[in-house]
Image (cartoon, coloured by chain):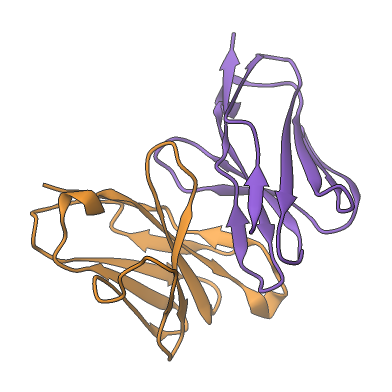
Amino acid sequence: GQNIDQPTEMTATEGAIVQINCTYQTSGFNGLFWYQQHAGEAPTFLSYNVLDGLEEKGRFSSFLSRSKGYSYLLLKELQMKDSASYLCAVMDSNYQLIWGAGTKLIIKP
Amino acid sequence: GAVVSQHPSRVICKSGTSVKIECRSLDFQATTMFWYRQFPKQSLMLMATSNEGSKATYEQGVEKDKFLINHASLTLSTLTVTSAHPEDSSFYICSARDWDRGSTEAFFGQGTRLTVV
């Protein structure tokens, strides 16, 4: 079956760095997405990786290793507004998105 | 990026009534739209894939007669929750991809919080 695993919850301190991991097992692979979702709102796009390596976009970076079925989202210089759920999603061979359950990130002052 | 507009953002209805949720792609044509529901503290669950001009494809366990989907144009898909019950209360979200631009990113509507009383 298809499976996306990510931690349920993480806590970090304002100004620090946090890494949210995601492992996946899917039928085919056409890219991995990271989305941010604040409570009561729809997800917003953060990053897309289809090739191995690190993609950097401002304070956020995303890494992919296809051979290991592994990705991480790295958030630097954490701000209180970064408190949200972070969803990992993989596009399978049918171009359908398979979603992880999300990681709730709590930022403390 | 592309914009997807979903309406209404919140709706409260009485048990037994029907509710229609609209999803519009504002600056691109979406031949395919996706409808999700999300329970508190849970991930998105794909309900159905809406294809313009044809019948929607429903995921296993989703009642097609209860969740009616109409994708009559390239910019509009609607989800109607028929004979709503309290257990249908949830957060419903639509998304679309702008295939014409070669984008694989899924753009989301704002979501609809449905409460059935």
- Chain that the image shows in purple: A
Decide: is A56 above or below A30: above
Decide: is B97 above or below A65: below
| Residue drawn at point x = 56 percent, y = 75 percent | B28
In the picture as drawn, the residue positioned furthest to the top comes out as A109
Give the percent coordinates (x, y) of residue A109.
Answer: 59, 8
Give the percent coordinates (x, y) of residue B83.
Answer: 13, 65
Number of numbered discs: 0
* Picture colour for chain B: orange
Give the percent coordinates (x, y) of residue B111.
Answer: 39, 53
| Residue drawn at point x = 15 percent, y = 66 percent | B18
Q: Quadrant of the N terminus of chain A?
A: bottom right
In the picture as drawn, the residue positioned furthest to the bottom comes out as B53
In this orientation, which residue lies closer to the viewer: A101 or B74? A101
Where is residue B56, by image quadrant? bottom left
Give the percent coordinates (x, y) of residue B82.
Answer: 18, 68
In this orientation, which residue lies closer to the viewer: B56 or A108? B56
Decide: is B96 above or below A16: below
| Residue drawn at point x = 61 percent, y = 67 percent | A96
Viewer can see residue A62:
yes
Viewer can see residue B1:
no
| Residue drawn at point x = 24 percent, y = 49 percent | B89
Q: Is residue A5 left or right of residue B81?
A: right
In the picture as drawn, the residue positioned furthest to the front comes out as A1
Q: Is residue A60 left or right of residue B110?
A: right
